[in-house]
Amino acid sequence: MARITRLLIANRGEIAVRIIRTCRRLGIASVAVYSEADAGALHVRLADEAVCIGAPSAQESYLHGERIIAAAQRAGCDAIHPGYGFLAENADFAQAVADAGLLFVGPTPDVIRRMGSKIAARLIAQQAGVPVAPGFEIEDERLSAERDDQSFLDARFAILNSIGFPLLIKASAGGGGRGMRIVTSIDEFGAALESARREAFKAFGDDRVYVEKCIARPRHIEVQVLGDTHGNLVHLFERECSIQRRHQKLVEESPSPFLDVALRERMGQMAIALARAVNYTNAGTVEFIVDPERNVYFLEMNTRLQVEHPVTESVVLAGARWPALDLVEWQLRIAQGEPLPFSQADLRQCGHAIECRVVAEDPANGFLPVTGHIVRVVEPLGADVRVDSGIERGSEVTPHYDSLLAKLVVRGETRGDAIRKMDAALRDYAIEGVATNLALLRDVIAHPAFRRGDTTTDFIERYFTSWPSLRDAGAERPTTLLMSSNPWRQRDRFRIGEGVVHAGQPANRARSEAMSTAARPDVPARRPSVGRQIEAPMPGQIVDVRVRVGDAVAAGATLVVLEAMKMETRLTAPAAGRVRRVHCVEGQTVERGQVLVELE
Ligand code: ADP
Ligand code: ADP
Ligand code: MG
């Protein structure tokens, strides 16, 4: 049996730190990799050895498979753990690791590839008897042909109508909530299809998309599975992850307040059936949505450790051991060929755990990610409190990576107990230097609907449209911000997987003027809602310039798409007008406040 003695961790932030901690406990040497932007990062300081692999951009560092494998070989590692994100679901990388004679801590390249296509995964699920939402592959000629004769359009409408509106266009290679479009009527279909394809290609290098019925008011409930290389396969029950923004998870818990014993058992069996169908090994998660009538639909399988895995670790017991499971430990043991020492009958849930994702985002400004220098961190303490953090005092939050700073996890005897502990822990948590969502998380946990377990994926949209409430508003917040800063207020501004900034929108204007009037003397403050200069709301990279000098634009038209911290933000025209100047090009890196487009 191969023994892992030296592990390279191909990731950053809290997950790299979390894997290092398990290595330490197991006596495995840890080797971190880092980009030039992360030289001072916590994971670099904590690892036994750290190797700089390149420039700040993810492509030049954490996504650069060859450099990572070369670093592992030079450092004498025997295995690579990819964490989540980045290279975790890249089948070619997993194959290259194996070809280099190293262990890849994850499933086989073949399984990663098969599940990496959501279209293929839907078919595998159907064959395994697992229900999927009604849908179609767009490659289907009846949907995608470039024809506009009436008989084609009628036939296409009939197919889409058989699914029913609203429907979703989703990227086959999608992840992180990207490449999705809601289509509420047939008129929107053509344009949405084109833009979903474009976004999917840009984000994943793969423009295949499919349509799926948009399930109303669902919950996101997923099942953790673990399989060894000897054919043993178990599930570790569910996590509910319905509290989301931009279709990305914010708060997760286990058990789900919605499941009863029978449905829990049934979903566990579905997850096992799917995993069994592909001979799944290592840790993985089968994601489902569940509608209010308790119909279950398979969404996708994530062939990696999931961000929210700690809630499972906090509540699942294997026999009498507690804490029962360290999922990273079991990933490593499985990778080196050990059989699982427990079977399904040994596993049970005990207590209740909740996780909050602490992100560098400003919920009061469209959840836009923010950057900065961390000047102080005070973490909550307590026997039932766990903080998986990637930051410490002095850390830099840069625009190169996503906005996750830390995860706060609490465990209670009951859900009510866990809620109380989470509330207290959030109050004890302080991060200074960058804006975070800590205050929003507190309000989510305190919300009566959350306490009731009335948690559906539209929770934030439904209950936090006017957040922060006047009660919570600090004196320093301009009142206009409270009125209109929320991205969910206007239905037409709601797009999955991206933020929208209406330049000159009162909230953003009030805010940026409050912060930087001196730097922008030429912006007429006296005409709120009519912005002439469209500025970058944060540092980032221009991924699309949609207008040219002289173009007439309608109010709300997208001018430029900016990507920062893994999120695309559309900058739109505050009012109808004409483009006077364009100051940016695709691919350009821009600073916050930099003028991108001028309108007249
Ligand atoms: P999980 O499914 O485990 O909850 P997420 O989907 O939240 O995980 O994130 C998984 C990985 O994808 C993480 O590495 C995260 O940094 C990355 N990620 C998060 N948001 C995005 C995004 N908008 N685009 C691309 N990657 C993202
Ligand atoms: P990703 O790969 O980006 O994680 P998923 O397919 O897992 O994409 O979906 C992410 C989220 O989008 C879900 O948790 C849910 O909130 C929403 N979603 C996805 N598909 C549907 C659907 N058919 N109906 C309603 N909501 C959906
Ligand atoms: Mg998902």
Image: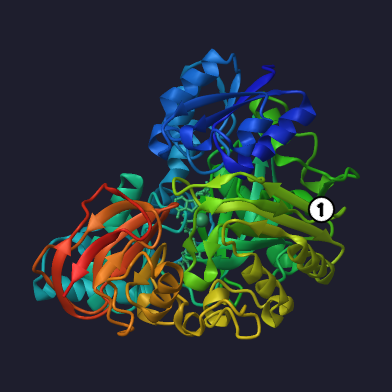
Q: Residue 413, position in %: x, y?
A: 87, 63
Element type at mark 1: strand
Residue 522 percent across, percent down from the top left: 27, 71
Q: Is residue 399 left or right of residue 529?
A: right
Towards the viewer: 274 or 330? 330
Residue nearest the viewer, comparing 469 with 318: 469
Query: Does 341 sit above or below residue 163?
Result: above
Q: Amino acid at mark 1?
A: Arg
Left or right of 415 on screen, residue 119: left
Is the residue 225 above or below the residue 245 in the image?
Answer: above
Report whether residue 361 is seen.
Answer: yes
Direction from residue 535 to residue 565 in the image, left or right: right
> What residue did someone put label 1 on?
348
Image quadrant for the C terminus? bottom left
Depth check, front residue: 8 or 284: 8
Q: Is mark 1 within 8 Å of ligand 1?
A: no
Residue visible at 52% across and 77% down in the picture: 461
Q: Quadrant of residue 421?
A: bottom right
